[in-house]
Amino acid sequence: MRPYRLEKATAQLSWGIDMDIRFRRSALLTLFLFLFSGRLLALPVDLATFDLVDATVTVFGPDNASAQILEDPTFAPVGLWETALAIPVGATTLSFSYELQVMAGNEDYFDFYFGNLSSPSAGFGGFAGIYSATITRDLTGFAGGTLPLAFALNFGFGDTGFDSLLTISNVSIAQAQVPAPSALLMLTLGLLMMLDVVRVNERV
């Protein structure tokens, strides 16, 4: 019976060590996922604070993150212009939706300026019709710095009217959420306590 008892005790010890290793790995994996899989926060961009908001622009919404832009018969393009929008650390993307209603007899475009106000980085629109989409741009290169940004309504060579309408909606910055130090401390202490419980159970 002794060899059997010795073999059984050895197997139990091996099982306990294996379980302790597995638990440690699981605890470390949990901590890693908690640290590096933070959720993304959507931070609205206050368009009312832009350096220049033309007279035919109406900013609206609870966070001032949307705007309507009408044509101006006296000059173009018209819109919202910001030379240095503050981009927070951890920012990942800028996103917004637009809808351009080009009326009959018009040729108009939505000019989007991103990173450079001297010329648009993209243009959308054309002759009479409705143009719409959701736009997303990478912000990782601007995180912790500033970004030149503008939304403008401009006319084309075939434009004969001044009644087109551009709507910019829900301009926001996605930012990676970093766990608070207090939450990290509590999680670490909890994992250490669980490891101690496993060790005590093994001794018993």
Image (cartoon, rainbow, N blue to C red):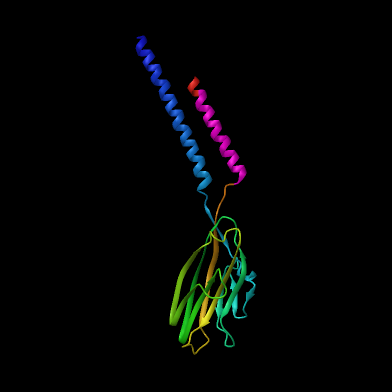
Magenta segment: 180-200
Please tell me in which quadrant of the rendered image residue 141 appears.
Answer: bottom right
Q: Residue at x 37, y 9 (%)?
A: 2
Residue 59 x %, y % = 60, 73
Of helix, strand and loop, which mostly describes the magenta segment?
helix
Q: Quadrant of residue 72?
A: bottom right
Residue 47 on image: x %, y %: 60, 69
Q: Position of residue 196 (x, y in %)?
A: 54, 28
Residue 109 in the magenta stretch? The answer is: no
Viewer-proximal residue, 60 or 139? Answer: 139
At x 60%, y 46%, the residue is 180
Q: Quadrant of the N terminus?
A: top left
Give the residue displayed 46% in from the left and 28% down from the top.
20
Magenta-colored stretch includes residue 182: yes
Quadrant hosting residue 75: bottom right
The spot of residue 162 in percent (x, y) is: 53, 87
